[in-house]
Image (cartoon, rainbow, N blue to C red):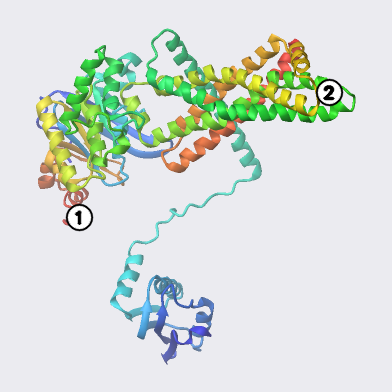
Amino acid sequence: MKNNKMLEITYPVETAAVISLSGDWSLAGESVSWSEFMQKLGGSQQPLEAISLTCRQPFNWDSRLLTFLRKLDDYADANEISLDTAGLPDGVQQLLHLSQVVPERSGVQGNPERNSMLQQLGEKTLGVVQEARLFTRFVGEWMIALSRFVLGRAKFRRSDFILFLQSAGADALPIVSLISILVGAILAFVGAVQLQMFGAEIYVANLVGLGTVREMGAMMTAIIMAGRTGSAYAAQLGTMQVNEEIDALKTLGISPMEFLVLPRSLALIIMLPLLCLWADVLGILGGVIVGVTLLDIALLEYLVQTQEAITLIDIAVGIIKSFIFAGVISLSGCLRGLQSGRNSSAVGNATTSAMVTAILLIVIWDALTTLIFNQLGI
Amino acid sequence: MKLNHAKAPVPAHIQVEDLTMSYGDVLIQRDLNFCIRRGDIFIIMGGSGCGKSTLLRHLIGLIKPAVGRIHYAAASFWEMDEQARNALLRKIGVLYQSGALWTAMTLAENVALPLQMYTDLPGPEIAELVSYKLSLVGLAGFEGYYPSEISGGMQKRAGLARAMALDPDILFFDEPSAGLDPVSARLLDDLILELSQSLGTTVVVVTHELASIFAIGNDSVFLDPVAKTMIAQGDPKTLLKQSDDPRVRRFLTRGEEQ
């Protein structure tokens, strides 16, 4: 046993043990095995009635000694052994007393109840229903604020609005451009490989044109903006919640919905369809690059083919979608921000959850509209 | 425990009636009954976690009471229509614990926002008012600074300037001296006292700083976290001399008198 020197047990009488401590009892020292100690303590034939502790120099101690003593004290209590610590340094005795003077409060240690799977499933489902209700109510409140805005009664700062327009519009151009060109090029490339088998490379123009204008343009910009702007909205409002800035607005009778949510959502609703148009153009450009350089289609031929493939209605389909996407992104960002708890990790959760909600709703809405437009023959 | 005021003739500014506060199923405080008289500096005190700040949030209309009513002058806050409630809120200034300045705006814009929202004053006049309010709290010349560029004490004072922007009838302070050094805390206390005396504003302060309590308070209510209700009411200095409740005495003497 390593700790022979640290711990010596003698039995002046059969029912009493004297434990003499020495050596390094600090966190940097060697650990003392509780089970080996218990074996040693069992050396007496009779059951113990008293334990007294002493120490010998060199003796170095810190919290490790105290954790050992607390364990020993619990053991002594459980077995009705009296424990005498008078032989230990004053500091040790005081700290031990301090750690015992306020008894552990029952019921404080959270005892997380494990529910059955069925119950958990039920709770989660109810949670989803509750979420849907909250979101619907939020959209309703937003509509009321919007109507007040239309009537010229909503109050927000014009300078804020212009700033939001810039950050949700011009500032997003580079990333939207890059991704649109690449997605257009990828569409063209994947399509070309298949179409080449039939010698129908020229239809790449139709594929890219229609795919971009009806689906990918709106969808890709929406997902980029959900990550870029929706989460920023959630983080901004969440931080304002933490700093009591939103309370400060409320106690002035200023509605956070009008002052914070309305300018943000309007900015995105104006800018996202514009970004979507821009993404359409660049997506087609990506297709052109692949078509002209890799498939040897003449530039003019490609453009004419594209022009014939796309109608104004196709473009309108994409734009209509992106209006709704903008609403979904900005409202889920703002809702999560306003719902955020009052600490930094809650703001992080709000941001994540804003992203997830927005992307989920984007994809659901996209699938739904595609189905509806298909049924309507648009 | 005496809950009736001997000096009642001064009209009540805020009257709290049978107020019970709870978060969901968790009871915070129950059966609160007290009145805040016009022009008083009223202290809400009690140990940590007793619900002082929650009471403040009820008084400023951020939380709806579970049970009970809060009257301003004669009107019950939650029974007014929204317009009346907003008009009332305009007459209330709040200094939050963290200052709660809008971080995206400069100090001048912070103070100006309530004025822009609720008055038709032209820009230059608003700028003059802003500069006057900032000078009242000793921040003249800091108009163009952002909240992140000034110290915590200055943020609190700027928050006070914003709270006073609309010349409120009632000023609420949530732990004004929290996070301030003793000298700054003292200066803020003096400022509160001066403002209350010169403007006749009713002041409600949530605090557990004994020095502040005795220096500025002339009426108070004491909330107890265990009894979950108010256990004393009155001028803190009188409470110190006369209260026979050991919990109140322990609090007011920093536990030195058991």
Across and down, in percent, residue B201 comes to 16, 26
Q: Is residue A108 visible?
A: yes
The amino acid type found where label 1 is placed reads Gly
Residue A22 location, quadrant: bottom left
The amino acid type found where label 2 is placed reads Glu
Q: Is disc 2 placed on a helix, strand or loop?
A: helix
Between A304 and B208, the one nearer to me in the picture: A304
Vertical order, A237 against A326 (above or below):
below
Across and down, in percent, residue B119 comes to 26, 14
Between B57 and B136, the one nearer to me in the picture: B136
Query: How much space separates mark 2 and mark 1, taking CA atoms?
Result: 88 Å
Between A32 and A242, the one nearer to me in the picture: A242
Q: Is residue A156 visible?
A: no
Same chain shared by disc 2 and disc 1? no
Across and down, in percent, residue A49 comes to 42, 82
Reading the image, the residue beneath label 2 is A201
Quadrant occupied by the C terminus of chain A = top right
Across and down, in percent, residue B88 comes to 27, 19
Q: Residue furthest top?
A: A151
Reading the image, the residue beneath label 1 is B255
Count of marks overlaid on the render: 2
Between A23 and A289, the one nearer to me in the picture: A289
